[in-house]
Amino acid sequence: MATSVLDQIRTLEHQKAKVKTETLRKVKQALNELNKLGFDYRVVGNGRVSERVRRRTRTLKNAPCRICGFRTVGPHDARAHRGQAKKAPFTRKELAERAMRRV
């Protein structure tokens, strides 16, 4: 009885792999047709379909903000001051509103 169960499991795994490869082939075929029409779609990691891969270009450095002159827990840099009319260091109230504290 144990061998028949193992045989069934192997058969199901084989069918699963076959269905997966067939489905992926169909998806790639459909994406090729879309690409011919001018769209830019492709299959990326784990079979996910994505129109465009967006990568982060900037990261926060462990350095003081060039406007404030100090570091904060909940790091920030000069980009955090975009909403200010005149760029100035954050006050204690503004830091509290942004859930930051001075280091």
Image (cartoon, helix red, strand yellow):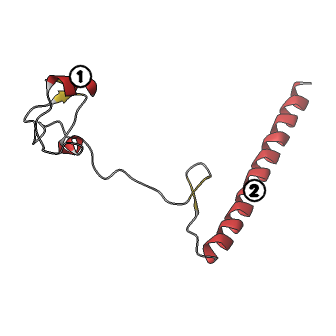
For image coordinates 55% across by 60% down, the residue present is 51
Instruction: Tell me the kind of residue under disc 2.
Output: Thr
Residue 13: where, in percent of width, then height? 78, 41
Examine the rendered structure and indicate whether residue 66 appears above or below residue 4.
below
Identify the image quadrant of the C terminus: top left
Q: Is residue 1 left or right of residue 80?
A: right
SS for tag 2? helix
SS for tag 1? helix
Q: Are marks 2 and 1 in contact (CB under 8 Å)?
A: no
Identify the image quadrant of the N terminus: top right
Alpha carbon separation for disc pair 2 and 1: 52 Å
First in residue order: circle 2 vs circle 1: 2
Closer to viewer: mark 2 or mark 1: 1
Say few, some or many: other residues with alpha carbon within 10 Å of mark 1 (under 14 / 14 to 19 / 20 or more): few
Q: Which residue is mark 1?
A: 96
Examine the rendered structure and indicate whether residue 25 appears above or below residue 95.
below
Examine the rendered structure and indicate whether residue 84 appears above or below residue 93.
below
Total residue callouts: 2
Say few, some or many: other residues with alpha carbon within 10 Å of mark 2 (under 14 / 14 to 19 / 20 or more): few
Camera-side residue of 64 and 10: 64
Q: Residue furthest front?
A: 85
Q: Which residue is mark 2?
A: 23
For image coordinates 31% across by 53% down, the residue present is 57
Residue 86: where, in percent of width, then height? 12, 44
